[in-house]
Amino acid sequence: MVDNELVHQVQTFLDAQESTDEFSGAVLVAHDNQPILTTARGYAIRPEILRNQPDTKFNIASVTKMFTAIAVMQLVGKEKLDLHVPISTYNANLPHADQITVHQLLTHTAGFDRYWNDAYRAARSELRTIHGYLKLFADTPLLFPSGTRHHYGNAGYVVLGALIEQVSGLSYYEYMKGEIFRVAGMQDTDFYEMDLPLANCAMGYTRESWFTPDDG
């Protein structure tokens, strides 16, 4: 298939997906390291207020965990972190620091519950720092002994963020921007405050709340 045929088929597919509300977002197709299609479908702000563009900013939510894991493994490679020692080695004041390891935090086996509690919902748009998130679950017991089960959630990765800050001497956000985003050439990737407007940014929606931004 030549490039023009591929582009036509992708465009046709995207048109069909948009017409049935099955896809909303931006698409880039490349061949031999060169873009052959850059396009977008759907609305960044509904209902029919602002359409997506190829350069629309999207929230990546838990995809951030992968970047956090990269940062952690960078620091493991620099021998600033060890995967298998208690995290109290680095900061004894972190939640359950003498019971959990970096490896358990990375693999969601440390035992932390989710912190989507009333305190989180009340303060979500105002949370600014890793320390602010830590306070949401610092006094919550572990769900199970570390390393015995798997339970997916955000709390363990907040603790990893605190460890990144501890051993790097930078804030989590400074480290991610300087050591990952800039190095990878990700010039349009950043963190932002939820209660402050950001130009050209899509709102997040769910099918259950199609015309209301998702705040869950």
Image: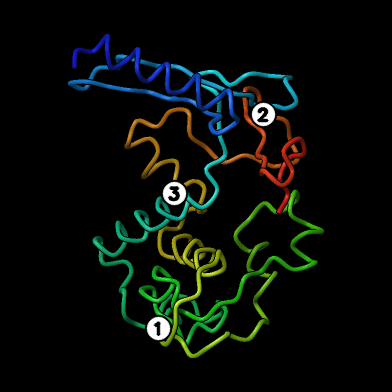
Q: Is residue 59 left or right of residue 81?
A: right
Q: Nearer the viewer, residue 179 or 2?
A: 2
Q: Quadrant of the N terminus?
A: top left
Q: Nearer the viewer, residue 171 or 123?
A: 123
Q: Which mark is residue 86?
A: 1
Q: Quadrant of the C terminus?
A: bottom right
Secondary element type, mark 1? loop
Question: Where does the image place residue 173, in percent across and percent down from the top left?
Answer: 52, 48
Nearer to us of marks 1 and 2 is 2
Rendering quarter of residue 140: bottom right
Rendering quarter of residue 198: top right
Q: Is residue 51 above or below residue 126?
A: above
Question: Where does the image place residue 103, in percent across and percent down from the top left?
Answer: 35, 74
Secondary element type, mark 2? loop
Disc 1 and disc 2: Cα gap in Å? 39 Å
Q: Nearer the viewer, residue 56 or 76?
A: 56
Disc 1 and disc 3: Cα gap in Å? 23 Å
Callout 3–callout 2 Cβ contact below 8 Å: no
Q: Which mark is residue 119?
A: none
Dot placed on the residue nearer the N-terminal end, 3 or 2 = 3
Callout 1–callout 3 Cβ contact below 8 Å: no
In the rendered image, which residue does mark 2 sit on? 198
In the rendered image, which residue does mark 3 sit on? 175
Q: Is residue 62 left or right of residue 67?
A: right
Question: Where does the image place residue 191, in percent across and percent down from the top left?
Answer: 56, 41
Q: Is residue 11 above or below residue 183?
A: above
Tell me the amino acid under the disc marked 1: Pro
Tell me the amino acid under the disc marked 2: Leu
